[in-house]
Amino acid sequence: MDGNGRWARIRGKLRIIGHQAGFSAVRRAVHFAVNYRFDALTLYAFSSENWKRPDKEINSLMQLFDQALNNEIDVLHKNNIKLQIIGDTNRFTIELQKNIRRSEKLTSKNSGLKLNIAANYGGRWDIVQGVKQLAIQVQKGILNPNQIDEDTLCRYVCMHELAPVDLVIRTGGEHRISNFLLWQIAYAELFFTDVLWPDFNDITFKRALNTFMKRERRFGNSVSI
Ligand code: IPE
Ligand code: MG
């Protein structure tokens, strides 16, 4: 979800105003995903690299995250949405960690949209935490290193219980993955748009879906004629 800062700058406003507008776009996107019966929607809210930003901006982002959980969790729950936060949450304050666990627990049995928020997430971190879990099993003698293959590691990366990712949308004009899901997007379609995240709306979302539907997904197979 890139482009909040630029959206604010164009309007002569503080970056946090851009993040607030970005939050409104999140609500719209979740609404869209529910209406269109998505199985899952994963939003990259805060990367492992975002800690490099000024303290003031980090604090306001954390505050926004905490408030969003407080204000939205009941609505999410009423809409049968299952919320999951992916990422290394240990670095957040104890209060925020509690809030996250509480929100996940409340919605854990819901069968509707799986809404995943990536917070202090990094694709490389994700793979490393999976490898660590495998290493522990090897150490305990439960797992033989020769048995390790792609399917083994697949079961330990975030969102392993969900279907593979179909489509990645990056807003804000950048044409890179920036350490978002790495393992999970091996065969995902990529859609890049110059639209700044706070401007992302149903029209942009539909454009991304239309592009996706026109693509032929071969998963390594040959071109069909
Ligand atoms: C939002 O956009 C991403 C978050 C970390 C919340 P940016 O804050 O990266 O916006 P730009 O790239 O400066 O426009
Ligand atoms: Mg950015």
Image (cartoon, rainbow, N blue to C red):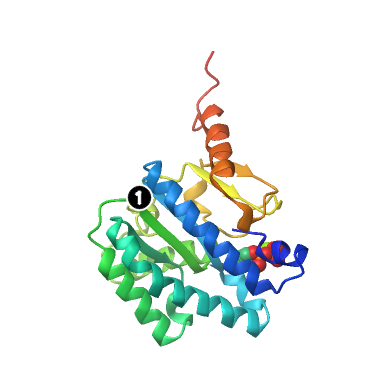
- Quarter of the picture holding the N terminus: bottom right
Tell me the element at label 1.
Answer: loop
Q: Where, by quadrant of the figure, is residue 67 drawn? A: bottom left
Q: Residue furthest left?
A: 109
What type is the residue that disc 1 sits on? Answer: Leu
Q: Report the label total.
A: 1
- Left or right, residue 77 beside residue 11: left
Q: Name which residue lies at 51% across and 80% down.
A: 63
The answer to whether 93 is drawn above or below residue 118 in the figure is: below
The foreground one among 147 and 121 is 121
Residue 211 or 19: which is nearer the viewer? 19
Mark 1 lies within 8 Å of ligand 1 (Cβ measured): no
Residue 76 in the image, given as x and y percentages of width and height: 34, 61
Ligand 1 located in image quadrant: bottom right
User: Residue at left 56%, top 75%?
Assistant: 61
**Residue 148 picture quarter:** bottom left
Can see residue 211?
Answer: yes
In the rendered image, is residue 141 in sight?
A: no
Can you identify the residue that label 1 sits on? 162
Where's residue 7, x and y in %? 70, 61
Q: Looking at the picture, does residue 221 appear above or below residue 13? A: above
Quarter residue 105 falls in: bottom left
Left or right of 189? Residue 39 is left
Residue at image location 35% in from the left, 68% down from the top = 73
Nearer to us in this view, 178 or 148: 178
Position of 151 with respect to 9 (left or right) is left
Q: Position of residue 117 (x, y in %)?
A: 45, 63
Q: Residue at x 40, y 86 (%)?
A: 94
* Residue 93, above or below 89: below
Structural crowding at the residue carrying mark 1, measured as other residues with C-alpha within 10 Å and reported as few (<14), some (14–19) or many (≥20):
few
